[in-house]
Amino acid sequence: MIKGRIAEIFDSVQGEGIYLGEKQVFVRFFGCNLRCKFCDTKLNYFTEYAVPELFSQIQSYPRDFHSISFTGGEPLLQKDFLKEVVILTKDEGYKNYLETNGVLFNELNEIIDYLDIIAMDYKLPSSTGDLPYWMAHQRFLEIASLKEVFVKIVISNTTETEDLLRALNLIKEVNRAVTIVLQPNSNENGFALDKKIDYYKALCEDYALATCKIPQMHKLIGAQ
């Protein structure tokens, strides 16, 4: 029997993106394939769950929440386990919401039919300090656009305008209807970063792309 490595399961409100404030059940998957310098989710523990065990945990919450957020880490690293879970939750009438770093497009393609909403990160190399993933992001967005999708871009003091413009060109080429969320790096604060994001928001609007600036609100209100 396939098992998944799960760091935690809890209910809370969504603190990021366009579904800010919606109540969700969060299933946090252990492990990530990227090493972003601004990462705020350092996981060093997990519990192994079989699919029926995890589904039982989800069912233990009253059904007064918007959706199940499969988050991480990176859920698509455990694609086979995740697929069995989302097939089951979809069959039972739950709404499936995937939070992902937006790189593993082959894995996404295998489960896209069972997802409802995709919160896709777009990793700018000057923000992450990691490798560029331009073509992987483009292919991922092409597949994600079969369902409801929005794109989150973390902006840091090190973010280069050239990177943002390249991302905007790729996004507009694939899906000009997508909403872009500019999220300030929560490890950095200050007037300079705030003004930078305002400038970047104006650039996005010049590209005729719907854009909003949303910080990590769960940190500001002290939610999990």
Image: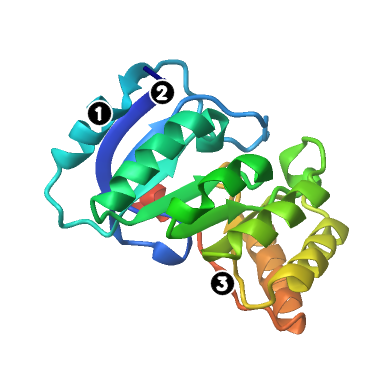
Q: Dot 3 surroundings within 10 Å: few (below 14), some, or many (20 or more)?
A: some
| Residue found 54% across the figure and 63% down from its top | 149
Image mark count: 3
- Per the image, the residue denoted by label 1 is 52
Q: Which mark is residue 121?
A: none
Label 3 secondary element: strand
* Amino acid beneath label 1: Pro
Q: Quadrant of the C terminus?
A: top left
The reply to whether dot 1 and dot 3 touch (C-beta < 8 Å) is: no
Q: Which mark is residue 4?
A: 2
Instruction: Give the vertical position of 37 relative to 132 (above or below).
Output: above
The image's colouring method is: rainbow
Q: CA distance from mark 1 to mark 2?
A: 11 Å
Mark 1 vs mark 2: give the one in front.
1
Q: CA distance from mark 3 to mark 2?
A: 34 Å
Question: Which residue is the site of mark 3?
Answer: 212
